[in-house]
Amino acid sequence: MSESTTTAPAAVGRTYKDYAKPWYQRLLVNRESAVIAALIIVIIYAWTQVPYFAQPITFTYLLLDIMPILLIALPMTLVIITGEIDLSVASTVGLSSVILGTLSQAGVPLVAAAVIALIVGALGGALNGFLITVVGLPSLAVTIGTLALYRGLAVGLLGTTAVTEFDEFWKDLVKSKLFDTPIPTVTVLFVVLAAVFVFLLHFTPFGRGIFAIGLSPETARFSGVRVERSKFILFVLTGTISALAGIFYTLRFSSARGDNATGLELAVIAAVLLGGVSIFGGRGAIHGVIAGVLLIGTLSSALRLASVTSDVINIITGALLIASVVSTSVLAVVRSKRTKPGGKKSDPLAAAKG
Amino acid sequence: MTALFTAPQPGLGQRVTHSLGGVAKARETGILLALIIIVAAATIKNPSFLFSADGFRDLLLTPSILLLVAVGQAIIIITRNVDLSVGSTLGLTAYLTGRLFIDVPGIPIVAVFAIGIVFGGLLGLVNGALVAFAKVPSLVITLGTLYAYRGINVLWTGSDRINSSDFPKAFLGLGTQQILYIPVLTLIALVVLIAAGYYLRNLRGGRELYAIGSDPQAANLYGLKVTQRVLVAFIVCGALAGLAGVLYAARYGTVNSQAGSGFELQAVGAAVIGGVAIFGGSGTVWGAAIGAYLLFTINRALPILGVQDFWQRAVVGVLIIGAIVLDRVLALRSTRKLVEARDAGNV
Amino acid sequence: MSSSTDASTPALELTRIAKAFGAVIALTNGTLALHPGSIHALVGENGAGKSTLVKIIAGLYQRDSGDFTLGGETVDFKSTAESKNAGIAVIYQEPTLFPDLSVTENIFMGRQPTLSLGRIDRKAMHTQALELFERLGVRIDPDRPTLGLSIADQQLIEIAKAISLDAKVLVMDEPTAALSGVEVERLFAVARSLRDEGRALLFISHRFDEVFDLCDTVTVMRDGAYISTSPIADTTVEKIVREMVGRDVATLFPKEEAAIGDEVLVVEGLTEAGVFHDISFSVRSGEIVALAGLVGAGRSEIARAIFGVDGYSSGSVKVNGRVVPKRNPAKAMQLGIALVPEDRRKQGLVLESSVSGNATLAIRKQLTASGFLTKNAENAAARIWASRLEVKTFALDTEAGTLSGGNQQKVVLAKWLATNPSVLIIDEPTRGIDVGTKAEVHRLLSQLAGEGLAILMISSELPEVLGMADRVLVVREGRITADQPRATATAETVMLAATQSLEAAK
C-alpha cells in the first residue's frame, strides 16, 4: 500500500457513467427528500393556518423542546445504520441529570459536575459497547437491560426528590437566544455537533465503514473495517451525547429528577426512522434525520397551538412512523417484484447461482 | 441398502443433546430456585412477607397480570418478533372496562371479559397485519402502535379517572377472591399459562412458531404458513394484553390514562430472564411466567432485605443483563460441544 | 414403488419453458425430461438458465410459457409448498434447516404425526426418523439440535425430509461444493440407492468428474436455451464444454513464465488447534503457489488466519520481512496482504452497495483528501480499476448484487488490486463463474505474477491448480503433506497427497 493506485495502465475502451439516474432523480427521489417535503408542507400549513405559530417565540420553544431529541438522534442514526439499537439513551439522560443535580447540590462547581456527568454517560455507553461487541450480546436485549439499570441508578440516587437549585448563569445561558434572533444559543452547539456527524458519516472512511457494517458485516470485516471497535465507539458516543442532552434538560427546566426524560428513547428512534434511516441498517442520512425531528417538533408545536391535546401528537407520531416504514417496505417489495419476481431480500437460492 | 446403520449409542452427541434439553429445563429450574431463595430470604427477615394472609395473596396475585403479558410477549419473541405496544393495549382495555361498566349499566361481567379480550385481539391484529403482510419489522410497528394506542387512551380518558365506585362490587371482588387460598386472577393466569404451554409444546402450530423464529427464511422455503402464524401470534398477544387490562381494572379498581405504562419492557425482561432467546426459536412460556414472578417478587423483597426500593429497577436491569450474558456463555459452550461431538464422529 | 410402470413416461418434463423478468430474459427454451430410475445431470455456464429452471420446478417462479408435466400430467405450482406436496424435493447448496430444533422436528415440521386432539406423537416421530436414517445408512442422533451439524449431514437430513415426503423427483443443486471426498461418496451412495428405488434425480454441477461418475444422462444448456441431451456413455468432457461455451476452448489456463524474485510471504509454524498444524511455506514475488486439497482440509482457514480475520495459537507470518500481527486485517492490508475470500457474496462484496463503493472499500483511507472522502474520488478510483478489469456494468452506482458472478468477482479483484498489495491470497478464484470469465481471471493472475505480485491461490479444481501454479502445496486435514513443483505435479500425485490418510483409515 506504499504507492498510489495509478500504477495500472490506462483504461482500455470501457467507459462508465457515474450514475445510472439523472441528477434530479437522484436528488429528489429518495427518503430524505420525502421527509423534507413533508416538513415544508407542515410548516407552510402551520404558518398560514395556525394562530400564533408564525411568532418568533414559537420557534424558540420548538427548538428548545426538541433539542434533546435533536442531539441524541445524531449518534443514534449511526447506531441504527450499523444494524444495532440503543434503548438506554433516555435512562442515561436521567442518570446524567441526577449526577449533575447531586454533585451541584454538594457544592461541586457546575462545569466540573457537567464534565463528570459526561464521563458517566460515556462509561454507560462503554458498558453497552462492551456487552455488545466483546461479549457478543444482541443490542436490543442489552439496552433493555441497561435502560432499566441506568434508570434504576438514577432513581435510586435521588429517590423521589428533585434538585432545583442551579447556577443562574448557566440556566440563563441555556435558555438564552442568539443576539436578537429567536434562535436559542444552544442551537450553535447542535449545529456544530451536526456538522461533525455529517462529516463523520458521509465524508470519512469511518462513515463508509459504518454503512458497510450495516449492509454486510462479514464483508466489512474482510475489508479491514474494525467492526467491533467502530460499534463500541458509537455506543460511547450515544452515551456521551445522551449525558449532554441530560445536562441541557436539567438546566433548562431547573430540575434534576430520577425520572427525567422517561420515554425519550422512543421519540428519538421514531424521529430517526421517520427521517429515512432503515431499521435493517445500511442506509440513512443526517439531513433526513434532522428533518424528521423537526417534523415531529413542528407538528407538536402546531397542534398544541391549535388547542389540540398533546396526546394527539403521540397518535400522529405513531401513525407517521408506521406509514413511513410500511411505505418503504411496500416500495422495496414492488421493486424486487419487478426485477425478479419470487425473489426475496436475502435469497438463499441466489447463493447457488453466485 | 446395506445395514451400515446401528442405533446410535448414547454417545457424546446424545449426552450433549440431553444436557441441552437439560439446559433449557435448567434455566426454568434455575430461576424457580432463585425465586424460592428470594422468597425464603425475605420471609426469614420478615415472616409476614409470606405468611400473612395479605402477603401470600399479594405475591400470587399482582404478578399474574404481568404474567399474562409476559406469556403473550414470549410467544411473540419466539417467532423472532417483539411487541412493544402491550402496555398501551393493557391501558386502553382497562379504561374500556371501566367505561363499559359506566356506560352500559348491568352489563354481565363475562361480557366485559369477552369484549376486553376481543378488543385486545383487534389491537394485536393491527400489529400482526402490518408485520405479517407489509413485512415491516415488528420493533418499529409496535413502537408506532405503542405511541398511537397510548395517545388514543389519553385522548379518550381526557381528565377523567375511573374509580372503584364505578365498578360493580362483584367485579372488584374477583380481584380479591380466592379459591383454596389461590386468588381467582392467579387461577385465570395459570389456566392461560397451561394452555399456552401445551400449545407451544404439543401442537403443530406451536412447533411452527419455533421454526419461524429459528430461521424465517427456512420456514418460508419449507412452505409453512408464516404469515398466518405470525398474524395469529400477534392477535393472541394482544388478546392476552386485553385480558390483562380487564384483570388490572379488577385488581386496582382505579384506572387512569397511564395504566400499563412500562409493562412492555417488563414483559420483555421477564421473558428474557425466563430463557426466551431474543432472537427467537427457543424458550418457554413457563420460563417467562417464572420470570414475571421473579421480577415482581424482587421488587417486593428488596425493601425487606434492606435495599431501598428505589434501587429495584437497577436490580431488574442487572438481572436482565445477567440473563442474556448467561445465555450467551451457555450457547457458546454448547455449540462448541456439539461441534466437538460431530468432529469425533459421534453424531 | 408406486411410480409409473411405463418407463418412457418421464417423471418430470419441461418443454420449451420461457421466463423473463422485465427486460431480462432468463429462459427462452428450457427443456428437460427426467425419467424415473435415472440420475440426470444438468450443466451450463452461469447465466445459462439452470437456476431459473430449478426455481420453476420448485414452484418459486411461474413459467411464462411452455409445458410442465409431472408424471404425464400438466402442473402449475404457485408455491414451494405445492411442488413439495406434488412430490418434488429440492436440495440446495446451503441447506436451510431450523438450528434450534431437533433433527426429527426439522424433518417432520408441519406434518408431525399426531394423536387425538392434534397432540404430536413424539415417539412415532422418533421411530420414523430412525427408520429414515436406517434407509439412508447414516448415523445421526434424531434428538440433537441441527445447530452445529456439518453441511454434509444437513444435506442428508434434507434428503431424509424428501424421502419422508415420498418425493418422486429430487433436484440437487451443486450439492458437493462444500463436501469432502468421503462425504461426497456417501452422498453418491445415497443418490444411487434413491435411483434404484425408482425416483428421478436431477444433479446440477460444475464438476465434470462427478457428473461422469454419478450420472447416466446429461443435458446441456446455454444462454437460456436447451442445447442437447445425451447418455453419459456417448459423450466426453470436451464435447460438453464445447456445447456449453459454443466455441472451442483451447487452453483455459495460460500461466506464462515470470521472473521469480525474493520471498514476499513467509509463514512459519502456523498452528490453530483442531484446524491446522505447523503450516510453513513461502511465496516469492512472481510466483503462483497453489494450496490444493479437499474441501474442509483447512485451506481457507489458513488463508483467513494469515490475513487476520481468524486467529491462530502459534506461529508467525511475515511480509517483506515485517511481522504481520494476528487478528488485525487492517494492519495486514497496510503491510501489503490482500485476501479475495471464498464466499463472494457474503465476504467479498457489499451486495447492496454500488460497484464504486465496493471497489474502493479497501482503499477508502487512501482516497481521503484533507480529511474528506468524496463520491467523486471514489468514482475516479473505481473507474480506473473497473475498466482495467473490464467489469461489465452500465454505471458505477449499479448495485453489486445485480451483476453476474463473473463480474462480481472482477469487482472484488478490483477492490483488492487497488490496494497495490505485495501478496494476493485468492480463495477459489473461479468458483461459480462462466468459462469465458474464468479464462479472463486466469490471464489476469498470470499477468499480475509477471508484474511481480506474489500469489497464493486456493483451489479445489485440479486442472486450475495444475495449470496455474508454479508450486503446489497439498493440505490434508490441516497439515501440508506435499510441496510439488510445476514440473512434477500431476493430478495423481496431488490427489494422493490430499487423501492418503482417508485411504489408510479405510
Image: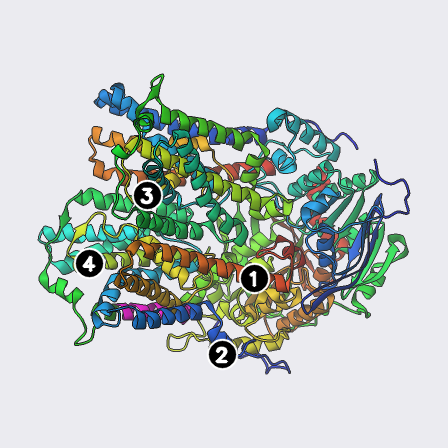
Q: Quadrant of residue B270?
A: top left
Q: CA distance from mark 2 to mark 1?
A: 32 Å
Q: Are marks 1 and 3 in contact (CB under 8 Å)?
A: no
Q: Is label 1 or label 3 in front?
A: 3
Q: Which residues are magenta?
A: A190-205
The answer for which chain carries disc 3 is B
Marks 4 and 3 share the same chain: no
Query: Which three-letter amino acid code belongs to the residue tagged 1?
Result: Gly
Callout 3 secondary element: loop
Q: Position of residue C361 (x, y in %)?
A: 50, 68
- Can see residue A229? no
Q: Mark 3 Cα within 10 Å, few/some/many (few <14, many 20+)? A: some
B252 or A119, which is in the foreground? B252
Q: Which residue is mark 4?
A: A115
- Can see residue A58? yes
Query: Which three-letter amino acid code belongs to the residue tagged 2?
Result: Tyr
